[in-house]
Amino acid sequence: MFESLKIESLTFQYSSARPVLKGVYLNAKASEIVGIAGQNGAGKSTLFNALTLFNEMKGSVFINDIYVPPKNLIKEIAYLPQMPFLPKEKKVKSVVKMFPISKEKQSAILADERISQLQNQRISTLSGGEKRYLEFLIINNLSKNIVILDEPFSEIEPIYEEKICNQILENSKTRLYLISDHNISTLKKLCTRILVLKNGYLEEV
């Protein structure tokens, strides 16, 4: 059973550039929805990538107080990156079935009132909001206890923003969510607490 995520002294820099993350500390538990705020270029996406895609970060990450090597973190985390990642030439129905999601949850995604009308369309024909909503549904239905969402509300219409929030709230009882978004008002309503990434450090609000 998932209980906690602990990040200690996480640092990261691109090649010889100045460090983007200088010493990030975070203690978070299951059932928390933690918002990560900060100005453009503060390093929010870099932080999320360091926890999932980059193996060059320095520092320590513990899940349930057990150290997890950087290369193994992606196995524990469901990650919605800022950039689109679905194959453009595949049809919606095929894309949903590509991911390690139970057949029951695949059916639920395809039965969603918005997605059901798009099943036979190619990803390349979807609007930005349609793609983002589909990406969220896929990532949120992966069987992972830690979910990182980078700009999940980008191009999302208010009615579907509310649906995303409701799904996060429904699934947060046993999970930990880390969310970054420019929509601070939504983060304030959704998150149990908000941290600000500034000058390479995370600070409590």
Image: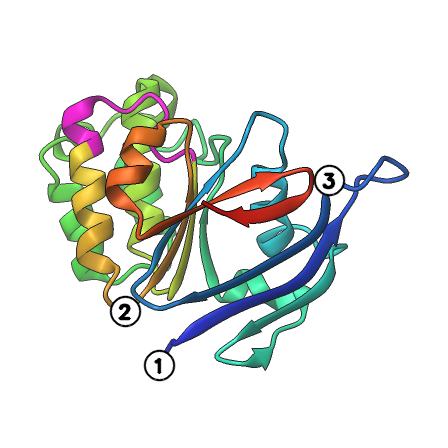
Q: Residues within 10 Å of mark 1 (few under 14, many from 20)?
A: few
- Position of 149 compared to 66: left or right? left
Q: Secondary structure at mark 1?
A: loop
Instruction: Identify residue type, mark 2.
Output: Thr
Q: Which residue is mark 2?
A: 174
Kindly indicate whether the residue at mark 2 contacts the one at mark 1 (C-beta within 8 angstroms). yes
Instruction: Identify residue type, mark 1.
Output: Met
Q: Which residue is mark 3?
A: 20
Q: Tag 3 or tag 1, which sits nearer the N-term?
A: 1
* Alpha carbons under labels 1 and 3: distance apart: 33 Å
Nearer to me, 89 or 51: 51
Q: Position of residue 32 (x, y in %)?
A: 33, 60
- Position of 90 compared to 47: left or right? left
State which quadrant residue 7 falls in: bottom right
Q: Is residue 158 magenta?
A: yes
Q: Which residue is mark 1?
A: 1
Q: Secondary structure at mark 2?
A: loop
* Alpha carbons under labels 1 and 2: distance apart: 8 Å
Residue ID at (79%, 42%): 19
State which quadrant residue 74 falls in: bottom right
Nearer to me, 105 or 66: 66
Q: Position of residue 21 (x, y in %)?
A: 70, 46
Which residues make up the magenta segment? Answer: 151-161
Q: Position of residue 109 (x, y in %)?
A: 19, 46
Vertical placement of residue 47 versus 42, above or below: below
- Position of 193 compared to 16: left or right? left
Nearer to me, 22 or 139: 22
Asked if one can make out residue 94 in the rendered structure from this viewpoint, the answer is no
Q: Which is the main secondary structure of the residues drawn in magenta? A: loop
